[in-house]
Image (cartoon, rainbow, N blue to C red):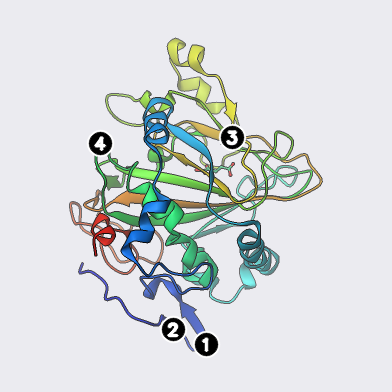
């Protein structure tokens, strides 16, 4: 696969419907794109934040969006949730589960691929406050060129919003390697104990099985505690959840092995989050099948480049 060209305008997927994955730079809809190389510096994490990430497996409460930016994104979010499978262009999405658990008392909207559908979701992928910071956390000890892997939405309705069972992200991603991935979880609604805010297990990014992630124990994010059936006594003793309690517009950044999850939403308000997943440039396919629905197949060992894996940050840009 070859690198996708940088154009000034996105192309249409079909008449009247834009495929935003064809634009490999921000459109300017969510934020003013960076004009001077020196501006990138203000988005860097401190040495303490980087050290904390490698010690605990996550950092939290990083401000990345204003409340107004969240509100704009929430309009797109609500429209998609309301129109559901009749949303125009929904077939471009990698996944769409209006209720991943299947249980009407524990509803979790979970979807991947909305960056193709709206300018705001597209621009979030290129947001400097997450992309520049990601370059410091993908590989220990050096900054890397950052590529987009995929996005996710997790929405829990009021009162009967579902759980996201404890898991490590890389358990779902071994079809890409090596493991040099990162998740950024952006709270577009404030998160609380009552509304199903995200929790982490500090130190769990060191939990592996012969160098591999823990096996997936619950594909439907339904049974919160199912991971415990496969943990060792030492891991169970260390299993001490901490809430990240993100304010609206704040993000947490977590390691691909950091165990995280969230309980149901029992508040009177929706709890919606936008998740962006990146990997370091140089990550390759570990599967001959398409890695996500609608993408071309990459051969095992082939570098992940092209339309669906744009570069969102390059350390060279700070010197341009
Ligand atoms: O929204 C949630 O509670 C879970 C999100 C998640 O799994 C993630 O951010 O990687």
How far apart are the alpha carbons under marks 2 and 1?
7 Å
* Residue under the image location 33 percent in, 80 percent down: 7
Q: CA distance from mark 4 to mark 1?
A: 46 Å
- Marks 2/4: CA–CA distance: 41 Å
Residue highlighted by disc 1: 16
Q: Say which residue appears at 32% left-offset and 48% top-offset.
A: 135
Distance between mark 1 and mark 3 Cα atoms: 41 Å
112 versus 225 height, above or below: below
Name the image quarter holding residue 210.
top left
**Where is 176 relative to 48, above or below?**
below
> Which tag is nearer the camera, tag 2 or tag 4?
4
* Closer to the camera in the image, 95 or 40: 40
The answer to whether the residues at label 3 and label 2 have Cβ atoms under 8 Å apart is no
Q: Which mark is residue 12?
A: 2
The residue where tag 4 is placed is 141
Measuring from the top left, give residue 222's x and y in whole percent.
Answer: 61, 38
Earlier sequence position, callout 1 versus callout 3: 1
Mark 3, Cα crowd under 10 Å, few <14 / some 14-19 / many 20+, is many
What numbered label is drawn on residue 244? 3
């Amino acid at each position: 696969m070859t690198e996708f060209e940088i154009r000034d305008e996105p192309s249409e997927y079909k008449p009247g419907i834009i495929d935003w994955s064809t634009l490999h730079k921000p459109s300017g809809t969510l934020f003013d794109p960076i004009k001077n190389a020196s501006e990138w510096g203000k988005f860097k994490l401190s040495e303490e934040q980087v050290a904390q990430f490698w010690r605990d497996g996550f950092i939290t409460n990083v401000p990345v969006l204003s409340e107004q930016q969240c509100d704009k994104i929430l309009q797109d979010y609500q429209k998609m949730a309301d129109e559901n499978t009749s949303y125009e262009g929904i077939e471009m999405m990698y996944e769409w589960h209006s209720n991943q658990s299947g249980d009407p008392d524990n509803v979790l909207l979970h979807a991947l691929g909305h960056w193709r559908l709206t300018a705001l979701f597209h621009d979030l992928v290129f947001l400097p406050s997450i992309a520049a910071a990601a370059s410091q956390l993908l590989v220990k000890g050096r900054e890397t060129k950052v590529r987009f892997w995929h996005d996710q939405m997790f929405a829990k309705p009021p009162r009967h919003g579902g759980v996201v069972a404890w898991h490590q992200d890389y358990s779902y991603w071994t079809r890409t390697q090596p493991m040099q991935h990162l998740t950024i979880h952006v709270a577009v609604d404030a998160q609380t104990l009552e509304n199903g805010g995200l929790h982490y297990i500090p130190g769990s990014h060191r939990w592996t099985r012969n160098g591999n992630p823990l096996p997936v124990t619950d594909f439907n994010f339904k049974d919160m505690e199912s991971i415990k059936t496969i943990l060792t006594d030492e891991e169970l003793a260390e299993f001490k959840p901490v809430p990240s309690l993100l304010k609206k517009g704040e993000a947490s950044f977590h390691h691909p092995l950091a165990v995280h999850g969230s309980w149901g939403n029992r508040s009177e308000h929706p709890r919606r989050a936008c998740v962006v997943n990146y990997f370091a440039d140089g990550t390759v396919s570990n599967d001959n099948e398409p890695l996500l629905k609608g993408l071309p197949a990459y051969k095992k060992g082939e570098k992940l480049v092209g339309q669906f894996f744009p570069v969102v940050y390059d350390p060279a840009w700070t010197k341009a």
